[in-house]
Image (cartoon, grey):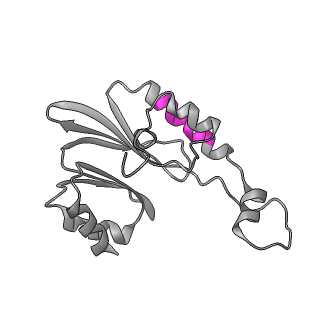
Amino acid sequence: KDELLESFLHSQSLDIVFLQEISKNHTQSVKSLLDLYPYQVSQSEQWGNKVLSKYPIIKADDLLGFGSSLPQRLEVDISGQKVAIYNVHLTWPISNPRLNLPLPGFILKAVSGFDDRPRNAQIDLLIEHLENEPLPYLVAGDFNVSQYTATYDKLARVAHDSFGKTEIGFG
């Protein structure tokens, strides 16, 4: 698995890589990419975020108040220009089913356990950070939100969706 990630990253021309749900064990193995990405910041959580960068990372913080999945905010120096980058992994909006029906399957669990309030609160908090961000910024990650929701539209008003523009690849 680690070899696949390494091979993939070596085959691309990426300046900054945003990873989510990276285990502590995998965090060590990505160090083998120091020749390609000399600047790396990992979270200390069991399953955290990690940023790999060709550009110097000046500052790195975890944003508080997001529950168990803390977004990273980093400042990078891109040819003399400071840029804030956010690496985000928001809460999955499906929890324990509210109804205990004897039907199997993911769809039932999704329908009966869907609760997007915690994730929506995280998005509101992220938007607040972005609206107060003094630097140009880039936000990437796993938002656990569909492009067909009002929540997505709210976020898209403060951060343009590059994937939505390209509709293919890395956006």
Asked if residue 45 can be seen in this view, the reply is no
Q: How many marks?
A: 0
Q: Position of residue 93 (x, y in %)?
A: 64, 52
Left or right: where 135 falls relative to 81: right
Asked if residue 24 can be seen in this view, the reply is yes
The relative height of residue 24 versus residue 37 in the rendered view (above or below) is below
Residue 162 sits in quarter: top left
For the C terminus, give its image quadrant: top left
Q: Nearer the viewer, residue 35 or 71?
A: 35
Q: Nearer the viewer, residue 12 or 74?
A: 12
Q: Is residue 61 left or right of residue 154?
A: left
Instruction: Name the one closer to the observer, 46 or 26.
Output: 26
Q: How far across and how far down the image is residue 135, in percent?
A: 32, 27
Residue 63 x %, y % = 44, 42
Q: State the image coordinates of residue 150 (x, y, percent, origin top left).
A: 64, 35
Q: Is residue 74 left or right of residue 100?
A: left
Q: Work out whether 109 lies above or below 151.
A: below
Q: Main secondary structure of the magenta part?
A: helix
Query: Which residue sits at x=19%, y=56%?
Result: 37
Tell me which residue sits at (30%, 72%) in the image. 4
Q: Which residues are magenta?
A: 120-129
Quarter residue 10 falls in:
bottom left
Residue at the (36%, 43%) spot, across then down: 61
Residue shown at the point (57%, 38%) measured from the top left: 152
Q: The N terminus lies in which quarter of the figure?
A: bottom left
Q: Is residue 5 magenta?
A: no
